[in-house]
Image (spheres, grey):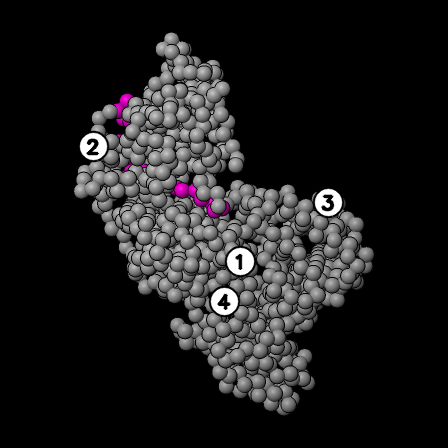
Amino acid sequence: MSEGVKVSLSIDKQCFNKKPNSLLIGAINNRLPNSVEELSVGEMAKQVVRPYSRTFCPAVFKNKQGERNNNNWNRQQVFALDIDENLTIHEALHRCETYHILPSFIYTSFNHSEECQRFRIVFILDEEVRDIRVRHFVQMGLMTIFPEGDKSTKDAARMFFGGKDIVYHNYDNFISVPIVRDASVLYIKTTSGTNESREMTKFCKMTGINMNNGLPYLELINSKQDLKGRDLSLNTYTNLKKNEIGLINIYRRYPKKIQYYLLHFSDRPEQYIDRNAKFEITKFKSHRNLVQNYDFGELEDTCRLFRESKCGNHWLFHSEMFGIMTNLLTIKGGAKWVEQILTSRPEYASYANKWNAMLNQIQKSQYAPTQCENYCPYALECDHGTNMVEQGKLFQGQIQVIEEQARIPKEEAEQRLKQMFEEAMNDEYKGIYIIKAPTGLGKTEAYVQAAKYKNLTIAVPTHRLKAEVANRMHEAGLHFLAVPDIPHLEREDRERIDRMYAAGAYRAAHRYLLRLAHQSTKDSEAIKSYLATTEKIRKARNTTILTTHHRVLNADNPNDTLIIDEDIIPALFPQSNMTIADFMLVMSRIMAQLEDHEDKRMLQVLRNKVLDAPLNIVQPMDSCLYVSAEKIEGIVAVDSSVQVDILGLLNCLYFAKSQNLYNKTEYISFVRRKSLPNKKIIIMSATINETIAKLAFGNNVKFSDVGLVEQKGSIIQIPMKSFSRASINQNKDEMQFLKKVLIHAFNPDSYEISYKNLTEISFGNVSGIDFLKGKNITIVGTPNLNQVAYLLFSAALGFTLGLNDSVMEYRLVKRNGYRFRYQTFGNSEILQDIQFYMVETELLQAVGRARTLRHEAKVLVLSNLPVPSAEFIHLKKNDVIRIKNDYLKVSSN
């Protein structure tokens, strides 16, 4: 057995072999406030009995040079009772076991004998109390359970003499404030007979605690979340504000047994010093709304403890029965299952009175459901959420953490990244290496340093990020060539070039730039320089090349190693769409200008296929050899009415027709597939998905994951709503107001990232943004795509979908260690993976802009898709009302 935790107390340095006389007591009294020691519980027990028998005071005092009195009391974790008559040690231990309030040790006093047993019971609280009211409540609670004790022990400055021998000890036993409260209530209930109500009121007046539904007003809470919206006045005490390091795990068999609570006192702390009169208390009545429409069948399937308890296969200890009751009694119909559990084993009959009293107590106290990890013996071997209630009913907008994800220190993660990158660079295998690492860990620095020793091609997502990397490479003294962005053009020329790119007429756009370069305009020199640099890069040898994802997929380069910064998979499977009306207009204009009848016929076949296509069904694009392909591109290039990617459609792999549910507009969407060059490729990304990567590149991909890393900043998420574009469009005023109040309450003065046309920084355009580094950010929305986008991507990966595979529904999902409800595909795991990959990629890109890994920035996420490393805030209806009212008050002022 261990020596227990260390506790602080005031203990005299002098040793005795008998009770000190009055003269010595006076000296001890003067020494005690200045005799504070920190001892393990076992060491304390040894010091208070022979041969030392040191006198002690459980309290630590404010002024060590001051007097030992209640006014000088500062803090306390040790509590003791002095028993001199009417109780034996055996009877005392039996009572402790009966009321589940176990002492750490018991020692006999100097005048103890077997015939007249005199002893002291020492309890260790699971926290160090610094509020005199809580100290008073604990001491009076213990004295209520042991009325045989010396009444003077209620004194906060009480001292206890040493004694003879330790007659009982278990230094791992601890009590807690809720345990003291429950034991006191149970004692009063089982010993007061018909006077229970009167005695309960008397106890509350004596301890100065208000009453709720006839019991001392204590609330059990699970987390800080339960404090949201609470009025924590000076008369309300909570231990949740404390540093958890100071709270002891009182049930060692469970990983996280820490009890948080609220105590509602009738007065302020200063009124509890030298107070003998009874307190004026307030009596409250409250009612709990039970969870409705609960699926106990789902609970039986997912909760082993419930399954084995209801049929008596699992013997329930007191803490397990308490945990089950606090959960089931919050559910409509749960009391019936509690009754079945209580009668599931004949041995339980002897506990019936105690457990029925506990049941009544839980109902009146309206205890929150106890968390699984705090009482369930199977907590470490099953997938579970916060509590048993959530196992059978997970509400929409609620996220369960079913697997705590370990996070490593930043320094360790940096070493992992460096090692993974070096191994990939040194490996002779010419294949694809993928390193998944959080944003801000040092990916850019890794390949910039590598470029000092080896000619690389480095591809980044955007020209903006390319410019930032170029600056880093200049600072490192590197020689390299950077693919240029298109120079400034006159508005008309720029619009024409942009339209050609939009239509997929890349060769025509290049020819147009050549023509502009030979004209005498103010832009011609810049265009010549752009074209010359492009040609120089095409012919380059023995130099590092800095380019973009788009360019690296459309141009050859000589270097044998390609570094890709961020996930390039979306660029490999580009998707586009156009309305059917635009499609018909463009096809008509092209066909009118074509002379080749075979080309016209083939385009006619394509047009009819699109028009006749059923909605939301992916179809392959027929392979057609257009004799006048170059002429079609020429028509598209010069016809200003062509504003859509018609050439992309003609060269796509798959297409699908869909319809907007609100305005009934029909669209055609399509996907193409591009290929990476045949060389060693190292992809480094924070968002890439291993499953999708292996589907895209093959199983020979070498995938490494640095893992989750400890954050310097914070990410908080409120998943109550998806804040989807559709919900915002349908209830714009309501959703905009809710967004404002949540930002005001949780992340004021923050930059906002949301949908295009709603904010300056939008989904789809966040990759490579660096100016938000270290800034507070609020992300509004879940960047879901049209259902067809997932179907097209799946088809491009080579999956054949069944007719029912594309059905989407709200369903329970387990992903990334979370359990939540989401609108997703119910009949296809691959479609689920694709959907979450595409949405998570965009959401995590947005979160990563704040660089919380290295900066003390805050990111608020208003989305129902869980973000790894986020702290989830689940707001109740009353919480939202309070937050809205607070916002309106501030706005009116």
Residue carrying label 1: 816
Q: Earlier in the sequence, mark 3 or mark 4?
A: 3
Q: Nearer the viewer, mark 2 or mark 3?
A: 2
Q: Nearer the viewer, mark 3 or mark 4?
A: 4
The location of residue 860, given as percent across then percent down, is: 46, 50
Q: Nearer the viewer, mark 1 or mark 4?
A: 1
Residue carrying label 4: 785
In the rendered image, residue 694 lying in the magenta stretch gets the answer no
Mark 1 neighbour class, 10 Å CA radius: few under 14, some 14 to 19, many 20 or more: some
Q: Secondary structure at mark 1?
A: loop
How many angstroms separate mark 3 from mark 4 (CA)? 41 Å
Residues at marks 2 and 3 touching, judged by CB atoms closer than 8 Å? no
Q: Earlier in the sequence, mark 1 or mark 2?
A: 2
Mark 3 neighbour class, 10 Å CA radius: few under 14, some 14 to 19, many 20 or more: some
Q: Is residue 864 visible?
A: no
How many angstroms separate mark 1 from mark 2 (CA)? 52 Å
Q: Secondary structure at mark 4?
A: loop
Q: Secondary structure at mark 3?
A: loop
Residue carrying label 3: 476
Q: Quadrant of residue 208?
A: top left
